Amino acid sequence: MVPVELKRLRVTRAALRRSFTISSKAVEEDMTNDTGASKVKESFAKFEDKALRLFEMDSSFFEQALLTIPESEADQNEFEREFEQTESYRDIYNAVKVKKDEYLQSSDDGNSSVSHACSTGQ
C-alpha cells in the first residue's frame, strides 16, 4: 500500500508535469512563430519557474519514496521507472533552454546587423 503522503506528492507532481509540458510547448511555439526575443524570454521565464517547482517536487517525492518503499524487486523497478521519467523532464528542460539560447543569440545577431546597417547607411 502506498502511503498517503506519497500519493499526495504524485498527484501534485502530475499537475506540475502537465503545466510544465504546456509551458514548454508555449516556448517552442513562440520561437517557431518568431514572436520576438521579449516574448520568448517571458514564456521561458514562466516555463523555467514551472520546471524548478517540478524538480523540487521530484526531490520531495524521491525522498519520501526512499523512506517508504519496500525493497522488493517490483518496487525497485517502479522506482527506476519514476527516476527515468524524472530525467526525461530534465532533458526536455535542457533542450528547450538550449533552443531558447540559440534563438536569442540569433535574434541578437540579427538586431546587431540591422542596427549596424542602419548606422552605416548600408
Image (tube, rainbow, N blue to C red):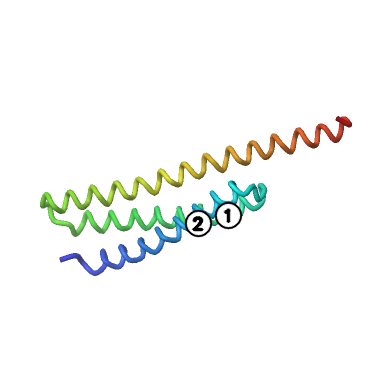
* Residue 81 picture location, percent across and down: 25, 49
| Lateral position of residue 24 relative to residue 122, left or right | left
The quadrant where residue 18 appears = bottom left
Residue at (19% x, 59% y) in the render? 68
Whole-number angstrom distance, CA of label 1 to CA of label 2:
7 Å
- In the rendered image, the residue lying farthest to the right is 121
Label 1 amino acid? Answer: Ser
Q: Residue at x 75, y 35 (%)?
A: 112
Q: Give the crowd class for mark 2: few <14, some 14-19, many >=20 residues within 10 Å.
A: many
Q: Is residue 64 left or right of residue 118?
A: left
Q: Nearer the viewer, residue 13 or 28?
A: 28
Per the image, the residue denoted by label 1 is 43
C-beta proximity under 8 Å, tags 1 and 2 = yes
Q: Is residue 16 left or right of residue 5?
A: right
- Tell me the residue at 28%/55% (across/down): 63
Q: Does 13 sit above or below residue 27? A: below
Residue 7: x percent and y percent?
26, 66
- Indicate the quadrant containing the C terminus: top left, top right, bottom left or bottom right: top right
As drawn, the label of residue 23 is 2
Q: Count the marks: how many?
A: 2
Relative to the observer, which residue lies in front, 25 or 3? 25
> On the rendered image, what quadrant is the N terminus found in?
bottom left
Relative to 89, say whether 98 is above or below. above
* Mark before the other along the chain sequence, 1 or 2: 2
Residue 32, position as x, y percentages in the image? 58, 47
